[in-house]
Amino acid sequence: MFQVHPLPAGSFAHLYSMSDEDLAARNVQVHLSDGAFPCRVSLADAAEGERVFLLNFEHQPGDTPYRSRHAVFVKDGAVEDHPLPGSVPACIASRFLSVRAFDKTHEMVDADVIEGSDVQDLIATFFADPKVDYLHLHYARRGCFAAKVTRSVG
């Protein structure tokens, strides 16, 4: 069994009250969703017309060559969603994904690409390897980080 994790809402709460000018000064772009902007906190596509922030986020802080930052979307006022263990949110399952497997030292030990609708089987395959500690899901077309996946407890 596995658990998909949202980014923590608290990491972005300071953005919600900032002016567009202050956001721009921090390289944060403001967009209105067309219904296909996947929020990394709510783990859902922002509704059409909803305000979203596009910003750079360090999703892989491990001190290795795989340390990484990339663009993520966060809905204005987003609330964390914690999916049920073993489930994949629709905003992830509906897209082509790159899945990257990391060990406890944050070194990449495997990777593959797959349709999101089939990702549960790949997650199970990667977690069958005892060297794999966690996974990162990325939206394959643009390379943006989607979510972290861990083994669920119990």
Image (cartoon, rainbow, N blue to C red):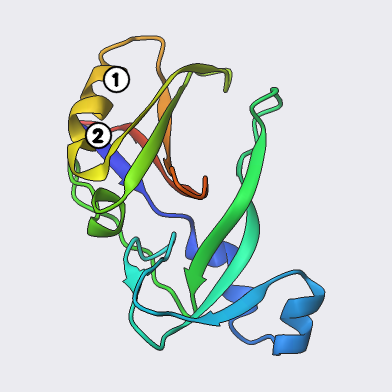
Amino acid, disc 2: Phe
Q: Secondary structure at mark 1?
A: helix
The residue depicted at 32 percent of the width and 44 percent of the height is: 4
- Inter-mark Cα distance, 2 to 1: 9 Å
Q: Position of residue 3 (x, y in %)?
A: 28, 40
Outermost residue toward the front? 141
CB atoms of marks 2 and 1 within 8 Å: yes
Q: Write down the residue under mark 2.
A: 2
Q: Quadrant of the N terminus?
A: top left
Q: Where on the picture, by quarter, is residue 63?
A: top right
The residue depicted at 63 percent of the width and 53 percent of the height is: 57
Q: Where on the picture, by quarter, is residue 50?
A: bottom left
Front in this rendered view, residue 57 or 6: 57
Front in this rendered view, residue 18 or 54: 54
Q: Position of residue 74 (x, y in %)?
A: 50, 68
Amino acid, disc 1: Phe
Q: Earlier in the sequence, mark 2 or mark 1?
A: 2
The residue depicted at 63 percent of the width and 87 percent of the height is: 17
Q: Position of residue 2 (x, y in %)?
A: 25, 34
The residue depicted at 62 percent of the width and 49 percent of the height is: 70
Q: Position of residue 59 (x, y in %)?
A: 58, 44
Tally of marks: 2
Tell me the tag on residue 127.
Answer: 1
